[in-house]
Amino acid sequence: MKRNHTMMQFFEWHVAADGEHWKRLAQMAPELKAIGIDSVWVPPVTKAVSAEDTGYGVYDLYDLGEFDQKGTVRTKYGTKQELIDAIAECLKNGIAVYVDLVMNHKAGADETEVFEVIEVDRNDRNKEISEPFEIEGWTKFTFPGRGDEYSSFKWDHNHFNGTDFDAKGKRSGVFRINGENKSWNQNVDDEFGNYDYLMFANIDYSHEEVKNEMLEWGKWLVDTLQCSGYRLDAIKHINHEFIKEFAAEMTRKRGEDFYIVGEFWNSNLEACREFLNTVDYQIDLFDVSLHYKLYAAALGGRDFDLTHIFDDTLVQTHPGNAVTFVDNHDSQPHEALESWVGDWFKQSAYALILLRRDGYPVVFYGDYYGIGGPAPIEGKKEAINPLLYARCHKAYGEQDDYFDHPNTIGWVRRGIEEMEGSGCAVVISNGDNGEKRMFLGEERAGEVWVDFTHNRGESVTIGEDGWVAFPVNGGSVSVWALPDAEEEEPAAEAQNAEAKGTTDRGATDSGATDSGDTDGGTTDSGATDSGTTDSGDTDSGDTDGESVTGEKVK
């Protein structure tokens, strides 16, 4: 019996630029495996414009921290050999490694060139606002520190279709490169009329030499690193037909088990469906819609109707292609797509992705270990660890939902025979203290369950009819399950949890009693869903899972 699978995004925007991150990953691999993480998404491994760049200002795709370029041999995260060693250590510990690929643009060119462009409106890229004219652009990449090692391909303005700075005129803009067969690609997101151009020198995937070079690089990279899969950055800006071809080539190269997930930052479900159709469902997508639902729930407090938390999300309509997450490096405070899920709802949000049947959940490094930089945030491993444990040991079997009250929802996982002691009941409240009466099965009559989050200190006994009322604190979550040997006595600090009530949950307490109701369904209070907002995109600055147990095999 294979256990549920869980990914960790092993970086946040402000990870120390000390060149030690690959070493940290190697050292922490046993710890990650022990807490239930069996795959990691690592940041871009290629040489960027400086040793401090997070990796999305990509310069040389073939320099993994090996050549003296851009003032450094190592990347922000370490050297090529340290990267290879870290991946090997992860694999030895049973942890798959997915490498972040930035294929949309190139930055930090070695030389300028003079070429003809047409300036377009920033807000409507199909609208020309100038006649053709010449600029001096940073578009020539010769890689003097690497030379022809691994690839002799040199980039110039013919391999791009747009740029954003005129060195001669010393001004910025969105400049479409003019020339034979030069235009924005049409197989991209239609925001701003056409969202092919994002930043820096925009790679032109209508150019055959470019496509061939990028396909060869993708195959070279996996051979070099022996990684388990790729995370594709900013794919709504890249020719969708190329993404389809790239995924097919990598599968041919490495086999069906090679995993690919894409960042298609669009909360519109129909747009996601169209993209998946285009690429023949060869890759998974991050569930951006669910992220914005969680964000809206955190902002809305008790006014958010929890019964609609999964409406219009990818995990609801395409569970086999949904990678669920609470936050990431782009949504963290002060970054390009800031939409941070508030602390009061964070544990509940993680329960909603970790303890459900569907989706491939990701734990964010910044949530688990904390965020650095000018406005640091402490990690929340104490809140997340019980959920990881429950996912690994308890959250199996059939799933029954009790989404019957706007402020208190719950679900049960019935457990499976192959996993002794499995099964759990989850209750979430964004209002007052409440309870949810749910059915576990007559065969479980008399079992005594405890709250693995320790938010509640008491135990509950399943009735002879298989039903029991599971309590939850207001603005909180409880995960009830049959205790393991080490869980027979709930943590001492939890004994007073009920008396202490709730912590700051970002919701106004109206004084009304929310019972959470029972199995019988309740009236809808009319609480509104505060909706979602798609803030656009960024530079990231932007074995298959079929099983009744809900495990996602990747």
Image (cartoon, helix red, strand yellow):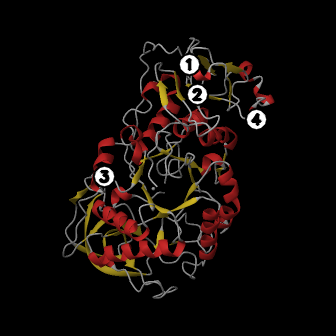
Rendered image: mark on residue 425: 2
Kindly identify which residue carries mark 3.
275
Tell me whether circle 2 and circle 4 mark residues in contact (CB < 8 Å). no
What is the crowding at mark 1: few (fewer than 14 residues within 10 Å), some, or many (at least 20)?
A: many
| Marks 4 and 1, the one that precedes in the sequence | 1
Task: Kindly identify the residue that appears in the image at 45 percent across and 76 percent down.
Answer: 220
Distance of label 1 from label 3 (alpha carbons): 39 Å
Distance of label 2 from label 3 (alpha carbons): 35 Å
Regarding mark 4 in the picture, which secondary structure is present there?
helix
Tell me whether circle 1 and circle 3 mark residues in contact (CB < 8 Å). no
What is the crowding at mark 4: few (fewer than 14 residues within 10 Å), some, or many (at least 20)?
A: few
Distance of label 2 from label 4 (alpha carbons): 19 Å
| Marks 2 and 4, the one that precedes in the sequence | 2
* Closer to the eye: label 3 or 4: 4
Left or right of residue 68, residue 182 in this image: left
Kindly identify which residue carries mark 1.
436
| Marks 3 and 4, the one that precedes in the sequence | 3
What is the crowding at mark 3: few (fewer than 14 residues within 10 Å), some, or many (at least 20)?
A: many
